[in-house]
Amino acid sequence: MFKKLSIIALGTGLILGAGGGWVQQADAQKPDWAGKGKPDHAGPKEKVENVIYMIPDGFNADYATNYRWYKGEDAVWDEHLKGLHKTYSEDSRVTDSAAAGTAMASGVKTTNGTVGLDEEGNEVETILEASEDQGKSTGLVATSTITHATPAVFASHVESRDNEAEIAKQMLANDVDVMLGGGKDFFVPESEGGEQEENLIEQAKEEGYTSVETQEELMDADDIDVEDGEKLLGLFADGPLNPEIDRESTEQPSLSDMTERSIDVLEQDKDGFFLMVEGSQIDWAGHDNDPTWAMKDTEAFEQAVEKAIEFAEEDGNTLVVIAGDHETGGMTVGSNGVYDTKPELVKDVTATGAAMAEELNEDRSNVEEVVEDHTPFDLTEEDVQTIQEAEDPKMAINHYISDEALVGWTSSAHTGVDIPVYAYGPQSDSFSGLLDNTDLPKIMAEAMKIDLADK
Ligand SMILES: [Zn+2]
């Protein structure tokens, strides 16, 4: 069925539009980079004005394949696949998000756990900072705390990713125009239950930020003028945002709403903008071996990518790059010796394994009740017993669901496999082939004709 869709798309100039519908795009309006397989040297390169860097943390081809079966058709990124990138860090063949992010933000490899510094501790310039230097406006969006490793590497420089209070201070000092995510605790003082010395939210307001804390307030903040020095800070939870599966029971915005609002604000800058959007929790799902969390947060990330591509289609000078920073969990497509995979079965699962484990009583006598309440599956006596006796009931529940969905896992940590790079827009073909994670920001800098150098 996937093949049929792509043939239709190629034959008639159909492109995937808003809301997943196929829309007609006249050949005459097609930008010249839209041609498939066009060589790099086929004419003068157009200057890219805006870059939207979309990072699904922990996502690899294994997630992409399972997600396609979950969805029942190609994901929005599938037709934009360009190449692969290597993810090893300065001190390990298996990277963490801080070292991976530093490489993807600055083009310099560093040691695991390090944010925005090279292996000798020197600050490295990031693509966000280089964009700021050219007068572009900048934004960071995440579903983790906004001070978590991946957003942090773009606008701060600290020895340890765990120092989120220091990261918060540096991110504010760095004047990022739009910051949306979780992590209010790192912006409010200890006297108010936070982990900061001073009230950074009050400080931010004095420096031109509008502060919002709910979906409604975010949507109402529609008059931020970046050209006039106005900025937007949205901290929607004390810690990370909820997993996508819980979102309707919260007042938090979706990743796609945060992406759309960021673009609305940043696109007013006549010098262009740089925006990084992270689907932070795909990685956490991988650590937990939770196929439901993985698929539903990938779906939320895809909706955000649709917003980015929709804007890029209209704008014409916007490059959208989508690349995970490493794989998490060693996910497999098919498991336990079975020649099949059924990730679509988790559509009817209504809670993460972690949330189900929280609902278990002390002697775990309610395993069957809790798991059957949140899943479409019937547990056998043996399944119940396995979860009751497991050292980690959350992992046992997730492995039970994974077995039903024929999704396998080989690790509870990151793995070192190469990761797909997808790109859409002018100069997107520059991302083809086998790249290194350090190549990504360098290619973006070249596309925007800006300098990216060690500080
Ligand atoms: Zn990561």
Image (cartoon, grey):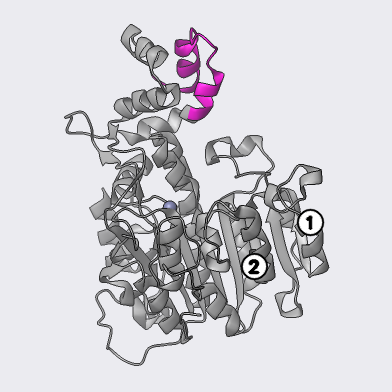
Q: Residue 45: which quarter of the image?
A: bottom left
Which residue extends farthest front?
A: 120
In the structure shown, which secondary structural element does the residue marked by tag 1 occupy?
loop
Q: Which residue appears at 23% of the width and 35% of the height? A: 334
The quadrant holding residue 38 is bottom left
Q: Where is residue 9 drawn, in percent x and y?
A: 31, 63
Q: Nearer the viewer, mark 1 or mark 2?
A: 1
Q: Which of the numbered marks, if any, corresponds to residue 360?
A: none
Instruction: Report the span colored magenta.
Output: 354-379
The stretch drawn in magenta includes residue 130: no
**Residue name at image x 76 percent, y 46 percent:** 190
Residue type marked 2: Asp
In this rendering, the answer to whether 251 lies above or below 152 is above
As drawn, is 280 to the left or to the right of 190? left
Figure check: 403 above or below 282: above
Mark 1: is the Cβ under 8 angstroms from ligand 1?
no
Please provide percent x and percent y for residue 41: 27, 88
Q: Earlier in the sequence, mark 1 or mark 2?
A: 1
Q: Nearer the viewer, residue 248 or 323?
A: 323
Q: Secondary structure at mark 2?
A: helix
Tell me, yes or no, whether the highlighted magenta stretch contains residue 377: yes
Residue 450 at what x, y percent from top left? Answer: 48, 85
Residue 71 can be seen, yes or no:
yes
Residue indicated by mark 2 = 264
Quickly name the residue at label 1. 198
Distance from the alpha carbon under mark 1 to that under mark 2: 30 Å
What residue appears at the point 37 percent right and 59 percent down from the top-left corner? 77
